[in-house]
């Protein structure tokens, strides 16, 4: 009889344990290591083109959703929407910028979608908006302390376009451009970049033709003026994409937020290579387009003391081009820069 009063306590304990159970987002069971993960090298083609394990219910299109397996209800997280480049796939992007490897350490929720045409356009905006809304709905707006857009190449250009739309302008706290255009002056892209990009793959089928300098200029023209939105901005690129020229000190985006003069932070050194590269453009290929993945060093520049705690920075991977996957330490450095933004 003395045990009877304990029954409600056991019931209460069971209820509390259920409330503290880890979240499951998007109907995707969390795994460690993340599912459909490449090995250290020679990632199989079938794995690279996999569309993901999550489904956006309104369009029926798949995507990847990576998050901490011990994520709790109400926990504060940083949400990242990561867009692949033209001719690429979500899982290639997922390994090009392997932020998924740091989801648990830095409490990140990462959505990596796919364009069915392998080129982003306004036709994809509803799908991307639905993914964002789904994550916000399942986590709760108060649990998302920051929302970052990340885009490689044409995915970066698409991020530039998205932050000019009402939906994303009202939500985005930061944009990380991975060789996807800088909000400020940059040296011209060398001709060897376009020559390698236009080369036909060994299979005899070029995934996508290179736009060439004129085509790229035309695509960038509507995006030349700075966006009206307010957000942190980080630009990352390979040294050879800049024609081995330095990034200018000038940054209109840093000036907008009253940041201090640019400072050179300690270089980041990686002994380990990234996961992926463009295996179809290596004969003959070019330094500007990108060679085989390998270790290296990256220069990190930041404009300090920006208004409202914004972050404005440039990162240059020395000796690298457009398509070598990011190494682990430089990936982590970019995450740290993103998380250092106060707003």
Image (spheres, helix red, strand yellow):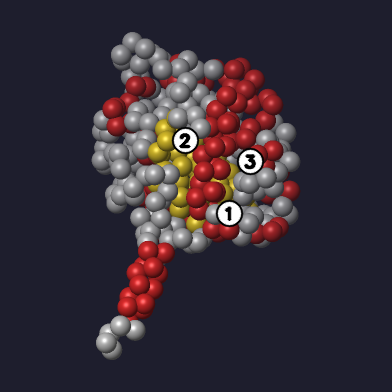
Mark 3 and mark 2: Cα distance apart in space: 18 Å
Residue 221: image location, x then y, percent:
68, 25
Residue 304 shows in this picture: no
Tell me the quadrant of the picture where the C terminus can be found.
bottom right
Per the image, label 3 sits on a secondary structure element best described as helix
Q: Which residue is mark 3?
A: 168
Residue 227 in the figure: left or right of residue 296 = right
Residue 219 shows in this picture: yes
- The residue carrying pointer 1 sits among few (fewer than 14), some (14 to 19) or many (20 or more) residues within 10 Å by Cα, namely some
Q: Which residue is mark 2?
A: 56
Per the image, label 2 sits on a secondary structure element best described as strand
Q: Which residue is mark 1?
A: 141
Q: Looking at this rendering, what residue extends furthest in the top direction?
A: 204
Callouts 1 and 3 close, C-beta under 8 Å: no
The structure residue drawn at horizontal position 47% and vertical position 35%, both measured from the top left corner, is 57
Residue 100: image location, x then y, percent:
39, 47
């Amino acid at each position: 009889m003395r045990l009877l009063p304990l029954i409600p306590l056991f019931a209460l304990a069971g209820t509390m344990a259920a409330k503290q159970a880890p979240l499951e987002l998007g109907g995707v069971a969390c795994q460690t290591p993340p599912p459909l993960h490449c090995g250290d090298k020679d990632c199989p083609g079938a794995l690279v083109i996999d569309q993901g394990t999550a489904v956006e219910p309104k369009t029926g299109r798949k995507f990847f959703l990576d998050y901490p397996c011990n994520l709790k209800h109400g926990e504060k997280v940083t949400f990242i929407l990561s867009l692949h480049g033209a001719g690429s796939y979500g899982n290639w992007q997922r390994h090009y910028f392997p932020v998924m490897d740091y989801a648990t350490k830095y409490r990140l929720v990462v959505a990596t979608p796919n364009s069915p045409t392998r080129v982003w356009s306004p036709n994809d905006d509803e799908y991307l908006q639905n993914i964002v809304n789904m994550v916000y709905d399942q986590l709760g707006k108060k649990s998302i302390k920051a929302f970052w857009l990340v885009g490689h190449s044409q995915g970066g250009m698409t991020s530039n376009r998205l932050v000019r739309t009402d939906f994303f302008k009202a939500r985005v706290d930061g944009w990380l451009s991975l060789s996807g255009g800088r909000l400020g002056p940059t040296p011209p892209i060398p001709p060897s970049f376009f020559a390698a990009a236009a080369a036909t793959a060994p299979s005899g089928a070029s995934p996508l033709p290179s736009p060439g300098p004129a085509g790229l200029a035309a695509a960038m023209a509507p995006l030349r003026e700075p966006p009206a939105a307010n957000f942190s901005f980080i630009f990352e690129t390979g040294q050879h994409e800049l024609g081995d020229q330095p990034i200018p000190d000038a940054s209109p985006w840093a000036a907008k937020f009253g940041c201090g003069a640019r400072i050179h932070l300690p270089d980041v050194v990686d002994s380990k290579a990234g996961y992926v590269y463009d295996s179809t453009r290596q004969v003959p290929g070019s330094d500007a387009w990108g060679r085989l993945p390998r270790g290296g060093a990256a220069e990190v520049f930041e404009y300090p003391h920006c208004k409202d705690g914004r972050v404005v920075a440039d990162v240059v991977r020395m000796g690298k081009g457009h398509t070598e996957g990011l190494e682990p330490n430089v990936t982590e450095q970019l995450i740290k820069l993103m998380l250092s933004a106060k707003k």
